[in-house]
Image (cartoon, rainbow, N blue to C red):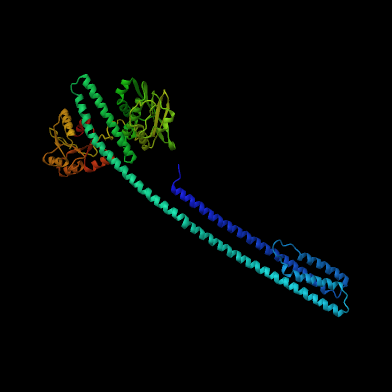
Amino acid sequence: MSDSSIYKLVNKRYLLALSIIFVLLLGHYFSYQWMLEEDSRLQEELITGSRLLDNWSRGSFLLYFWEYKDRVITRQKIERQMSLIDSLCSEPRGDKPGLFSPIKEQSKQLLNSIHHFAGQNFPSEWAFKLQKQNILHKIEGVTATISRHIFNVRYQIEDHKKSAEKLSLILLIAELIFLQLILIFLLRPVARKTDALFKKLEREKEEAVNANNAKSLYLSTMSHEIRTPLNGVLAMTDLLMETDLSFEQRDYLGIIQASGKDLLSVISDILDFSRLESNQLELMEMNFSLKQLLEKVLENFEDEARDKGIQLMYYSEPEVPEYITGDPKRLSQILMNLLSNALKFTRDGEIFIRTSIQSGENDNSEILFAVSDTGMGIPEDRLDSLFQPFKQIRNSIEKRFEGTGLGLALSARLVELMSGSIWVESEINKGSTFYFSIPLRTDGQMASAPPLPAVDEDVSLPEEPLVHTPETTAPEGMQILLAEDNTINQRLMERLMERIGYKLDIARDGREAVEMARKKRYNIIFMDLQMPELDGLQATRRILSEAPENKPFIIAMTANVSQEDRDLCLQAGMVDYIAKPISLEKVKEMISRFEK
């Protein structure tokens, strides 16, 4: 993957900044080394000058005693002193002038004078003293010169220290200034570009979120629009199946019914996956029977398994509790996707569901589900892409199985939403086993549990009304109103009510429903949410606000069911809702709940 432009810019500016800082540090290092060498040289000259001054003092002291000593002995001593001074004057100083350079000629002349003085005979004592006095003056002059030079060296050392401190301070200030310039001219443009890029990413993220929300709204609307005619197809097929038909006609209707249910399943998967992608799908929390759920899931595949000669089985380990807490609808959806996938890829043999308890993270217990089949197996190089959306397992010659490739991806997302994990093990021509685990949660053992919702509904509907309603006795002849703008759904509900034995009044929009509720007391009102004039929520609020004490039970009827829709229905005053496509069993169950 190529580096981004911002990375290249930062890297280039960073290398340039490092180069400049390195040059500054290198200059600082060499200047510091030069100061150390200069200080060492001056200190050495100071020590050497002190030695020379001491030698000159001793030499002059000996000369003072010449008038009391033998001249020959004194001459030998002077020669040794001359040799010592000559040695000090000729000390090597490398490529720099030494301390004796300024007095070199003066000291040589003095040494020659002393040498000449020691080797000659003076005509009188007065001449000797005069020459001696002259030499002593020269010695004192050289001594004074050396003393001044030593003082100068000490002054140079102090001055050098001050200069070194000043130079160090100047270099430090220069480095800080360069660092500031680096921050201003090198890194600030990077910071500006990074800020601009961040703002651009924020805008793109916001646009992506808005686009995703728009996509979810579009899919939700399209789901409603598609489910409306599909509702009529499936419901009318159910009614037609209960009439006298020939074997051929019943077979054709069975194909229509199965195809309609497959289409409904695809629509539901796409809508659920869209909700998961936009974080709009929420889980329910209820206590349910795991055994009953497994039996209900297997019951949906009995006919298909029987036709293919495949045996369906399940087994729960003894330590698995019968009643657990969670979302039975979504757990059923996961199992049904895995079972549907197993039936699709299994020609004969068996499909087996097994549940057990295992230790999860932080020693918490998890329920492990295993769905095994004896099918064709999955190639190892395809296992990683199984849980990716819109992926299918195909061989290289023919497309053997149809489908959107959403089932496993949707199951993986649902398991993740339940804080669980999912994986698969497979062997070619021997079968596959899909595993998933979810945290075990229980609310205590229950003597009985409410019946599970049908697994083909859009959401888990509660088995009690959404709000508490007082017990009332309906008058003879239950009065039922349908508020629905779609003609097909109107005719469908009329036929369903006739089959149950009830007469149905129909309002074609929300405003007409309000008017009819003013003129007649209805026990139950089936209210579509999306209608012209007034939508179902607005019509519900008006009917309940204008109704007398015995208010009607208003039941939402929509294909666009989500947690948000459920909350809106509750806030508007509805007592329950029924999800499309509507079946005879759903209508019977809902009326029986509120007819007493």
Q: Residue furthest bottom?
A: 126
| Percent x, y of residue 313 | 35, 23
Q: Quadrant for residue 460, please give it.
A: top left
Name the image quarter holding residue 411: top left
Left or right: residue 200 versus residue 506 is right
Q: Is residue 120 above or below residue 314?
A: below
Residue occupying the point 23% across, 43% down: 571
**In the picture, residue 92 is in which quadrant?**
bottom right
Depth order, front residue of 162/544:
162
Q: Quadrant of the N terminus?
A: top left
Count of picture labels: 0
Residue 415 on image: x %, y %: 37, 35
The quarter of the picture where the C terminus appears is top left
Q: Is residue 378 left or right of residue 19?
A: left
Of 475 and 131, nearer the camera is: 131
Left or right of 186 in this view: 267: left
**Can you give x and y, in whole percent of width and height, for residue 277 in the image?**
34, 39
Q: Residue furthest left?
A: 519
- Residue 453 visible (yes or no): no
Visible residue check, residue 567: yes
Q: Is residue 178 left or right of residue 72?
A: left
Q: Residue at x 31, y 39 (%)?
A: 275
Is residue 231 or residue 467 the one in the foreground? 231
Q: Nearer the viewer, residue 285 or 434?
A: 434
Location of residue 585 in the rendering, given as x and y in whole percent from the top left corner = 22, 29
